[in-house]
Image: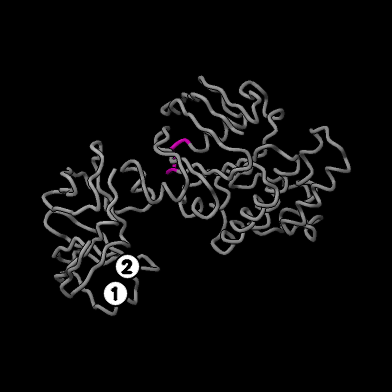
Amino acid sequence: MIEIEALRIELAGFTLEDMELSIQDGEFFTLLGPTGAGKTLVLEAIAGMVPLTSGRIRVKGRDITDLPPEQRGIGIVYQDYALFPHLSVLENITFGLHYHSADLQASKNWVKNLMDRLGLQLLAHRSIHYLSGGEKQRVALARALAVNPSVLLLDEPLSALDPNFREGIRDVLKELHQGVRITFLMVTHDFAEALFLSERTAILNHGRIEQIGPVSEVFQRPATPFVAEFVGMKNVFPGTFKETIAVVDGLELELPSPPARDKRYVAIRSEDIVVSKEKLSGNGLNVFQGRVLEVIDRGLYYEVSVRTGKIIFKAMLTKSALFEIKLPEGKDVDIAIPSSAIHVF
């Protein structure tokens, strides 16, 4: 559906480096990465808003690299909605139809279908000024989809919303994609959004793709230290390997099987580390003594930092678990890491 070949964009102080990306027809795909990684630049390149240094872009087999934006058959939704303040909800939604030759009755039926799906029929004649953030985002979605595009591009569509609207629009996006089966390409820096919405993802860092794959695979098996940290693995260490042993700063970790020879890092999710005031032991567990350095309230859970030798492990405890074991800073504890929870790359 979307084929990006050797895409390169050179700007002052930033380069998008020879990107290769293939997105399937009807897929919900996310581009993930921190601010400044180049995510929005990829969307703008597909939409025809920035000049390319080199490379080609194809949509449904058609080369759109040199076409103007209005001839590409692409809809785009911005994080700030970009609605016309002097037009009503319905006028905003149908604005783009004036520039597309299409069957009038078919277009009316499609717009009605969209407005029904998005709960906008009762707002049709309301001014944009009197809409909530969530309502504005639904209008922006309807406007982008009204021209029946081949691809819908979404630029951080949830980031400008208050938390009470964000979850609702996230659900709307999922239901809408399942209903219309148009290819969705969304930019976000929030991995939780990608995990909920998309089938596959690409992680960008400084203009390069670090990893592409199913969201669950990227989450469970990151390919680089950057990706590991980006998806929430707070225990990432360089290591050396000998058969089923990983050595990290002198600490030996038992692995479930010998890793491939090219592996150089160890990563462990915080939630997979057990912290106890009692002595721990057991098959398949790496057990170490340590001392609690810091306990940080992260809202829904506590992050507990434990020093073992030269290494500081970060573990996750629920609030009830922390209160139950009464774990102050400076306390000596045991930590246990299942060998099956150790990821190497």
Tell me the number on the disc at residue 322: 1
* Residue 21 higher or lower than 194, as above or below: above
Lateral position of residue 291 relative to residue 65, left or right: left
Pointers 2 and 1 in contact (CB under 8 A)? yes
The disc label shown at residue 5, or none: none
Residue 97: image x %, image y %? 80, 38
Quarter where residue 95 is shown = top right
Instruction: Residue 302: give its label.
Output: 2
**Magenta part mainly helix, strand or loop?**
loop
Look at label 2 and name its amino acid. Answer: Tyr
Left or right, 303 with respect to 184, comes to: left
Q: Residue at x 85, y 43 (%)?
A: 106
Q: Is residue 221 above or below residue 45?
A: below
State the extent of the magenta-drawn residues as a range.
33-38
Q: Residue furthest bottom?
A: 324
Which residue is pictured at 42% across the width and 29% down the height? 14
Point out the image quarter for the C terminus. top left
Q: Is residue 264 above or below residue 289?
A: above
Name the residue located 54 percent from the left edge and 47 percent from the top edge. Answer: 156
Residue 155 image point, x, y percent: 57, 43
Towards the viewer: 129 or 161: 161
Mark earlier in primary sequence (2, 1) = 2
Q: Is residue 177 magenta?
A: no
- Quarter in which the N terminus is drawn: top right
Q: In what element is the residue under mark 1?
A: helix
Q: Give the x, y percent position of residue 35.
A: 44, 42
Provide residue 134's location: percent of width, then percent of height. 64, 58
Q: Residue furthest right?
A: 105
